[in-house]
Image (tube, grey):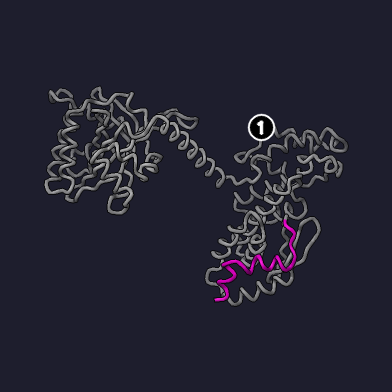
Amino acid sequence: MMKTIITFFLLLFAAQSVLSQVDKIAKEVESIVLLRSQNDDHKNHIKNFFEHYNQAKPIGSEDLIRDYTGICIETFPEKKSLLFPAKYSVDFPSEDSRTSYFNLNPVETSISKNENSGEYLKLFLENSSKASKTDYFLSLKYVDSDKKGKAERMDDQLVIADDDFLSFLKIKDQKIYGISFSLMALKSKNLTESEIRMYIFDQNLISADDYMMIQLENSRKKKYNKTKVQRETYPLYHDYRVDELRTALRDLIGDAPYSSDQILIKYVSNLKNKLERTNIAGYAEELSYFAALKIDKKYKEGNEEAIVNINHTALHSLADISIGKKEYQQAEKYLLKALTEFPLYSLSGTTSEKDANRIEYDLAKVYQKLERKDEAYGYLLALINSQWYYSSAEKEITALLGSDDKNTLKKDIDKALKTFNVRPNYFQEFTFRGNKIVFWNGFPLDKKSFSENITETEFYKSLKS
């Protein structure tokens, strides 16, 4: 679309004027803005902007390859202009895209709403070099954009076009001056109705060292956001451990009696590719078989963790697959088996505890999805005693309370605390509203400490009021 519109204007203005197409449009924009700003608070800044813009030269590609900070004056038909901080950013080609994107955007925090940005804007207009000393600049320089602006050639000048705006950029004394306006307003020959933006960016505010840090940080954020989407779409707690199944199973089928299990050998041969969150659901049939294997105790005696954990890893992965598919009854079944029948075996107590706590937290979530609120309460009460999830559990149980009767809930919790019992292998249990809650805890608990961990929370205290 962007190229089509730009090509349209190249044809429209060809041979019509001694002025270039870009200059002709820029002059029209200037006339519109100066007319709008006759009684505007930023009238002098706007006039000063166009004086510099008209003296500046078209920008070259070498000046488009760095991030810059600056300001934006935004004007509208029949409304006063607004002043914003602004950021110019570059996204270079990556594994997800072979295209470079160039983005200039106002950072939508006006001087009237944010005192920190107000100090930055004031100093930038007075002496832009001083703006880098403000606290606001420290956050502004890391701002990135979701826009996908592309650099195009228009009348042999570089312009930036995204889905909404066309921007002309010029440079003078290491400052970049840009005007942006609506592509649709331009296409309909109605620029007088367009929102028009004027940008000033100082090339010196962000140092070379800062720029490298910005690129690293934004790359980290993009990678995190990408994996966050994957984590939400394909939940898998054992994202790294799951591929150990392939190695462990290949070792296992080398030993009797597994070497004569033709179904097992067939399923293991299916695991040709690395197992990860995006493909694990395709191996649900194989995982179900692995989950039911009887693993000889000699592997535990030899501390062969990957083999010992074949059942657990398969079950926990099946649970995550079920959660991703919203098959919560199946998820409950797999989670309970992974927690109580085949808990993660590790020489590291921390690793075992984190795994058990995560299963208990997922059980609380699953029970909420199944509208079995009492069991959700039970596992959240258990997690208040955990080392890793106590804070999340208290927040979750507070949110779960909703409009429930506080007095009744307190009485039921007090009753449940009296049922606490220690089981072998770090397991504990208690009964809440008729539901037996079995959980794993690396810290030694007794009835007194279990009760105190719960009754000293702000959540429990709120039930007394």
Does residue 99 appear left or right of residue 451 in this picture? left
* Quadrant into which the N terminus falls: top left
Q: Pinpoint residue 289: horizontal percent, then vertical percent.
A: 76, 44
Q: Pinpoint residue 425: horizontal percent, then vertical percent.
A: 79, 55
Residues shaded magenta: 443-465
Quarter-of-image position of residue 69: top left
| Residue at the image position 72 percent from the left and 43 percent from the top | 287
Quarter-of-image position of residue 183: top left
Query: Looking at the image, which is closer to me, 358 or 117?
Result: 117
Query: Looking at the image, which is closer to me, 187 or 432?
Result: 432
Q: Is mark 1 on a helix, strand or loop?
A: loop
Tally of numbered tags: 1
Quick check: can you spot residue 12?
A: no
Quick check: can you spot residue 383?
A: yes
Does residue 82 appear left or right of residue 402 in this picture? left
Q: Pinpoint residue 16: horizontal percent, then vertical percent.
A: 13, 25
Residue 319 highlighted magenta (yes or no) = no
Q: Is residue 270 above or below residue 364?
A: above
| Residue at the image position 50 percent from the left and 30 percent from the top | 95
Query: Looking at the image, which is closer to me, 289 or 61?
Result: 61
Residue 446 highlighted magenta (yes or no) = yes
Q: Mark 1 points at which residue?
A: 273
* Quadrant into which the C terminus falls: bottom right
- Mark 1 belongs to which amino acid? Asn
Badge 1 local density, few (<14 within 10 Å), some, or many (20+)?
few
